[in-house]
């Protein structure tokens, strides 16, 4: 009996027990378990390439828009300039003011249609109206920067914002050529500034977000080189149309429209970083695969993009409610105000120099080339903060030195040493202007980057809007204008001492991630310093 029980127990223990049926895991979970996750930054660095033929083509095509931005910004150097005048019956250009003469005793050398001042008589008691269109243009840029920056970060993205800006810039420039009076002209210049504001802020972000961290500074400079090309093209366009200011607007209005339809729309890709932060990872991967193929590389099939930890739609609110980001933004805007004031003021001031305006504009435009070249080289060797502050301080010093030349005889015109100093100061201001954009891009994460650049743009445009008033004041007191220009430039260089360095740092995706990683980096650096001590 005992043996029988043992056999039953033994049989029961060895008998296979029925297993509970388990459903196989869904295919998506299996796939995700076997896939590798990487951030967009890691995919670019490890698989696409930090900077290859694909990024070079992308950056070049995007940066072409800077040409039209430059043309529409600086066209008033010719269209709003006061042309030379002469006494009727005389062939010699007169000097001084015509306000004490009867209106029929003198005439404009190039005819009444050569500029808005000649056509609408913006001299003598109406002289204050001559600077109004330029100031309103920059105010339009100020307001447009806020809207375009938000659209580029949220709803439209970088590419569509540039597309919209180019089309509206073309339309408003053409309508400007039809202005019946100075008030309509001023409104359309405001509208043109509002439209073109999306070009600069989006182009620099769209260019830098497709390359590796090592090349961000250099890539940002390429756009400014194309801005210089647009600046240089203005004398070439303006000289054949010198008898009609309306024709120059008609010419420059055609370029951005053709670019938007035949270059930007079919050939430029959206930023993969922006697509990722908006949760459109499949589209972001398509862009990265396209860049990798053009670079002769291949992204692993099982690689997927890691979604950011936090995706905030109210990006502008997140920036201003985050303590460290708000303080950083205020410092950047204060710095930008001074730089914009000097950069645009020096360019608009060329009409107050006793030189051929076409030659003077060409000289200033040519000075942007060494600014871009030296800026790109220095960004690869020095910190962002050092390059910017040095450039701003040099621009301020040049303005101060101009005071001594302007004090001779109480005039600031016709002096070659002064022109040389102004040209050098403009080169330094141009370098500071360019570097500040790169610096701002790296100071903020992807979900607020375009908004941050737009806020910088607003500060630059606010400074630029006040600059025409100082240019008009410079006709009466050259020394005072140079003191103010120099003072603002020096202050801009000083403000950056309270900003962190960003050279070779990663581009973060969200405010939370950047705050966490920067604190971790600061703690690590502090430990290293303690070990060294």
Image: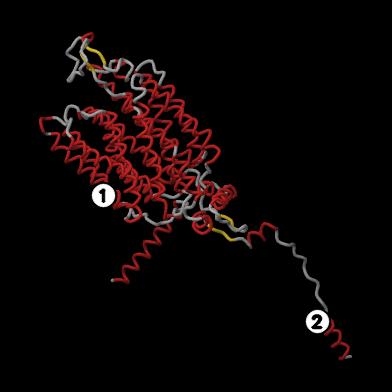
Q: Nearer the viewer, mark 1 or mark 2?
A: 1
Residue 120 place in picture, x, y as percent: 31, 15
Binning the other alpha carbons within 10 Å of mark 2 as few (below 14), some (14 to 19) or many (20 upward) gives few
* Quadrant in the picture for residue 365: top left
Hey, which residue is sitting farthest front in the picture?
Answer: 91
**SS label for mark 1:** helix
The residue that label 1 is drawn on is 390
Q: Quadrant of the C terminus?
A: bottom left
Indicate left or right for 89 with 17 as reference.
left
The extreme left residue here reads 409
Image check: 101 left or right of 370?
Answer: left
Q: Mark 2 highlights which residue?
A: 13
Closest to the observer: 394 or 515? 394
Which image quadrant for residue 63? Answer: top left
Which image quadrant is residue 137 in?
top left
In this rendering, the answer to whether 201 lies above or below 389 is above
* Gap in angstroms between the C-alphas marked 1 and 2: 85 Å
- Of mark 1 and mark 2, the one earlier in the sequence is 2
Decide: is 248 above or below 448: above
In the rendered view, does 389 fall on the left or right side of 181? left
**Badge count:** 2
Crowding at mark 1 (Cα within 10 Å: few <14, some 14-19, many 20+): some
Q: Quadrant of the N terminus?
A: bottom right
Q: For this view, does 529 lie left or right of residue 473?
A: right
């Amino acid at each position: 009996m005992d043996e029988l029980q043992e056999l039953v127990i033994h049989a029961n223990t060895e008998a296979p027990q029925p297993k509970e049926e388990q459903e196989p895991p869904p295919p998506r979970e299996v796939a995700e378990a076997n896939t590798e996750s990487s951030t967009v930054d890691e995919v670019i660095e490890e698989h696409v390439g930090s900077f290859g033929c694909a990024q070079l083509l992308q950056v070049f095509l995007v940066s072409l828009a800077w040409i039209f931005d430059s043309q529409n910004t600086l066209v008033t150097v010719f269209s709003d300039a006061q042309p030379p005048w002469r006494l009727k019956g005389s062939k010699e250009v007169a000097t001084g003011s015509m306000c004490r003469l009867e209106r029929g005793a003198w005439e404009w050398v190039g005819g009444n249609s050569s500029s808005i001042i000649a056509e609408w008589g913006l001299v003598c008691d109406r002289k204050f109206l001559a600077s109004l269109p330029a100031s309103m243009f920059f105010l339009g840029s100020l307001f447009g920067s806020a809207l375009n920056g938000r659209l580029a970060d949220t709803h439209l993205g970088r590419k569509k914002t540039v597309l919209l800006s180019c089309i509206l810039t073309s339309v408003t420039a053409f309508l400007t050529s039809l202005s019946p009076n100075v008030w309509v002209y001023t409104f359309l210049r405001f509208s043109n500034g509002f439209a073109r504001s999306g070009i600069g802020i989006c182009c620099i972000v769209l260019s830098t977000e497709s390359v590796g961290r090592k090349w961000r500074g250099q890539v940002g400079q390429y756009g400014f080189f194309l801005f210089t090309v647009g600046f240089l093209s203005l004398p070439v366009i303006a000289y054949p149309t010198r008898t009609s200011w309306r024709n120059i607007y008609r010419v420059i209005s055609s370029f951005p429209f053709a670019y938007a339809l035949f270059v930007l729309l079919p050939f430029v890709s959206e930023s993969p970083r922006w697509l990722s932060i908006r949760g459109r990872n499949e589209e972001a991967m398509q862009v990265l695969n396209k860049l990798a193929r053009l670079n002769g590389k291949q992204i692993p099939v099982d690689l997927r993009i890691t979604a950011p930890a936090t995706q905030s739609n109210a990006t502008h609110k997140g920036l201003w409610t985050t303590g460290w980001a708000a303080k950083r933004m205020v410092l950047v805007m204060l710095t930008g105000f001074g730089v914009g004031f000097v950069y645009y003021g020096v360019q608009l001031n060329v009409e107050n120099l006793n030189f051929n305006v076409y030659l003077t504009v060409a000289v200033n435009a040519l000075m942007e080339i060494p600014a871009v070249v030296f800026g790109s080289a220095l960004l690869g060797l020095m910190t962002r903060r050092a390059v910017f502050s040095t450039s701003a301080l040099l621009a301020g010093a040049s303005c101060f030195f101009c005071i001594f030349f302007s004090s001779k005889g109480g005039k600031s015109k016709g002096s070659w040493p002064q022109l040389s100093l102004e040209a050098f100061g403009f080169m330094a201001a141009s370098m500071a202007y360019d570097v500040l954009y790169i610096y701002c891009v790296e100071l903020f994460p992807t979900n607020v980057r375009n908004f941050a650049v737009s806020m910088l743009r607003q500060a630059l445009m606010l400074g630029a809007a006040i600059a025409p008033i100082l240019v008009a004041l410079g006709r009466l007191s050259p020394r005072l204008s140079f003191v103010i220009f120099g003072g603002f430039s020096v202050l801009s260089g000083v403000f950056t001492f309270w900003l962190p360095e960003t050279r070779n740092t990663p581009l973060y995706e969200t405010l939370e991630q950047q705050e966490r990683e920067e604190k971790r980096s600061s703690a690590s650096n502090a430990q290293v310093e303690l070990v060294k001590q």
